[in-house]
Amino acid sequence: MYIILVYDIASANGGEKRVGKMLKHCRKYLNWIQNSVFEGEITEVKLKEMLYIARKIMNEETDSIIIFKSRDERWLDKEVIGVERMMTNNFL
């Protein structure tokens, strides 16, 4: 499946530390395209694994993760206005 993942970490109570940990964690599974935004192909098992660890990093009382799922990247129209932080279409 193809997903877009967005997270929001509250700045209070050690949020800066959690932001760094979440960024590093998500980059292991997906392509980082913008601050707190990731996209890419992932299996259901890998997604569950990623979210299991993400829940340990985040504070579910103040932080959030939103996941948009699609069967395939072809079913997603993507338009970038301005500078694209990380190009994801140049992989072999």
Image (cartoon, rainbow, N blue to C red):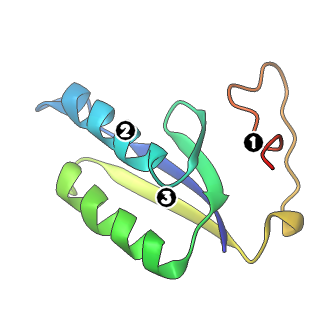
Above or below residue 64? Residue 50 is below
Q: In terms of secondary structure, where does tag 2 sit?
A: helix
Residue positioned 39% across, 38% down in the render: 23
The alpha-carbon separation of the residues under discs 1 and 3 comes to 20 Å
Q: In terms of secondary structure, where does tag 3 sit?
A: strand
Residue underneath mark 3: 66
Residue positioned 23% across, 37% down in the render: 18
| Res 24 label | 2
Instruction: Answer left or right for 7 relative to 83.
Output: left
Identify the image quadrant of residue 76: bottom right
- Give percent across and percent down for residue 21: 27, 38
Q: Earlier in the sequence, mark 2 or mark 3?
A: 2
Residue 61 appears anywhere in the view? no
| Res 56 label | none
Residue positioned 49% across, 37% down in the render: 36
Q: In terms of secondary structure, where does tag 1 sit?
A: loop
Q: Earlier in the sequence, mark 2 or mark 1?
A: 2
Residue 4 appears anywhere in the view? yes
Residue positioned 74% across, 78% down in the render: 71
Q: Amino acid at mark 2?
A: Lys
| Res 88 label | 1
- Classify the position of the N terminus by image quarter: bottom right
